[in-house]
Amino acid sequence: MLAYYSFVGFETSVNLAEEVQDPRRSYPRALFGALLTAGAVYLLVGLVASASVPTDRLAASSGPLLEVVRLAGGVPEWLFSLVALVAVANGALLTGIMSSRLAYGMARDGLLPSVLARVLPGRRTPWVAVLATSALSLALALTGEVDALAETLVLLLLVVFVAVNAAVLVLRRRPGEAGHFRVPVVVPWLGLASCLLLFTRVDGAVWLRGLVLVGLGTVLAVVNALRARRSRSAG
């Protein structure tokens, strides 16, 4: 499950697709291009690492790529650590952008408190959503180690991916707009199957933490949905 964390990040770009000039044309190409490029890089890194260092040594190490750097030489360990730190920070930044934009969009649709939809007058930055999601991230960071938090994030993303793939199957039955991207029906079915398979690899402690967060989110969504319904009825 922890290895799945290395593939996290591609889905965050969808939250910024509305800022693309022609998302129906540009976004699918950019997304699939990034997936193919990253997949090729991951494959090459895996092949080089396996060819350079014995597999059992890589499996037993807490820093497999660091073992490759040590064996190859030429790159100072402090420089490799700096690059790794920047890479991890970049992943955290992408997750922060995704969560704040997602909270802003849900607030704008009435699924979260409307205060999260407030933006700066000039830059249009959802500053309340940024502060709220950052505070929540800091609070969660105090509840466990990095590996446990990463596995919890993967579990929550799997829940999201199940909902997205199910939504794709429903949306395929609707005509939609002319010229929109239409994915083959086998793709969402394979997505659902892979998510269900990965659910079986989640530890009990991760399930407990994840279900608590999903439960809190569900309660908040129900409360705001009822509030929005009452507002429409009153109007």
Image (cartoon, rainbow, N blue to C red):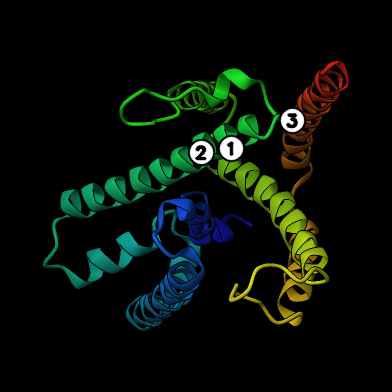
**Spatial separation of the CA atoms under disc 3 and disc 2:** 16 Å
Q: Nearer the viewer, mark 3 or mark 1?
A: 1
Q: Is residue 45 above or below residue 202?
A: below
Residue 148 position, x and y percent, is: 60, 40
For label 2, the residue is: 101
Q: Callout 3: helix, strand or loop? A: helix
In the rendered image, which quarter is residue 53 located in? bottom left
Q: In the depicted view, which residue is nearer to us: 110 or 69?
A: 110
Q: Residue furthest left?
A: 74
Q: In the depicted view, which residue is nearer to us: 103 or 4?
A: 103
Quadrant containing the C terminus in the rendered view: top right
Name the amino acid, label 1.
Gly
Q: In the depicted view, which residue is nearer to us: 64 or 119?
A: 119
Asked whether the viewer can see residue 201, the reply is: no
For label 1, the residue is: 105
Residue 13 position, x and y percent, is: 47, 55
Q: Earlier in the sequence, mark 3 or mark 1?
A: 1
Q: Residue at x 81, y 28 (%)?
A: 225
For label 3, the residue is: 217
Please say if the residues under marks 2 and 1 sit with CB atoms less than 8 Å apart.
yes
